Amino acid sequence: MELPKNQFKAGLKAGNTQIGLWSTLCSNIVAEIIAHSGYDWIVIDTEHSPNETPNVVSQLQAMATGTASPIVRPAWNDKVLIKRLLDIGVQSLVIPFVQNAEEAQAAVAATRYPPEGIRGVTGSGRGAGYGRNKNYLHEAGNEICVVVQIETGEALAQIKDIASVPGVDAVFIGPADLSASLGHLGNAKHPEVQAALKSAIDQLNDLGVPGGILAFNQDDAKRYMEWGYKFVAVGSDMSVLRIGTTQLADAFK
């Protein structure tokens, strides 16, 4: 049994621009629908949604034949949470609230077996094909993609050090938390926030490290892509459902 190729990681290495969707509805049925909708990647969020490991397993299974590569955001940069996600077959992770190079190093170490890291060893989990992939322990690291998330002004000031940590494949900028950190809670369009987002991707591009971001309208998403962001979430399943159902109801009132 061969280890699945991480298409999202391969796309990052190739320099491709990849569009994604955020998923917070904790549903395997929703996951199956959106995985076949043409996106390149989908984040299954466990930080800001009531998603637990059994729910994530069912969503991964539902997405298995779709076009979108699954990425999972653990609730925290925690070696136990990361270990459990890797064991169920997650190959790409967005690690939230990484503040400095040391925390980025800890995130990478949590995804690697000793001696390179501290990941606990098992060859019988879903990630290893329930024991059918005999080479999993030696091959898993090749397909694991570590994306660290920068969400504060403090972290932004250290973006080059964070992005340069070996094993960090990409950096995701969180506009909402960054806006709050800069004193503009709920206003990602503030000129200071926009300047910070532009500065972030300029620095990442100088380093040759792919940058990602989340946008909730098409104009923002297109602008971020023009700036050089290489993986952009263009909405969420929840917002699509909310907006679509509201517009449909309004059309008949």
Image: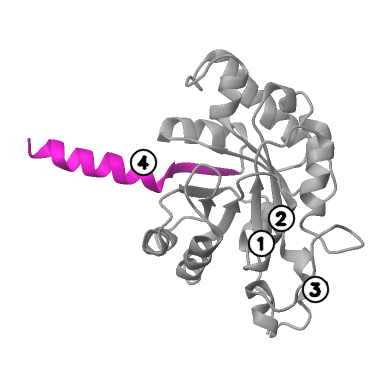
Q: Residues within 10 Å of mark 3 (few under 14, many from 20)?
A: some
Q: Which segment is the magenta one?
A: 231-253
Residue 59 x, y percent position in the rendering: 47, 63
The amino acid at mark 1 is Arg
Image quarter in which the C terminus is found: top left
The amino acid at mark 2 is Val
Asked if the residue at tag 2 contacts the one at tag 4, i.e. Cβ–Cβ closer than 8 Å, the answer is no
Q: Nearer the viewer, residue 243 or 78?
A: 78
Q: Please identify the residue farthest to the right as the structure is shown.
A: 115
Q: Is residue 105 left or right of residue 237?
A: right
Q: Earlier in the sequence, mark 4 or mark 2?
A: 2
Name the secondary structure under disc 2. helix
Q: CA distance from mark 4 to mark 1?
A: 28 Å
From the image, tell me which residue sits under label 1: 84
Asked if the residue at tag 1 contacts the one at tag 3, i.e. Cβ–Cβ closer than 8 Å, the answer is no
From the image, tell me which residue sits under label 4: 239
Image quarter in which the N terminus is found: bottom right
Residue 117 x, y percent position in the rendering: 86, 57
- Is-magenta flag for residue 92? no
From the image, tell me which residue sits under label 2: 80
Q: Which mark is residue 137?
A: 3
Q: Residues within 10 Å of mark 4 (few under 14, many from 20)?
A: some
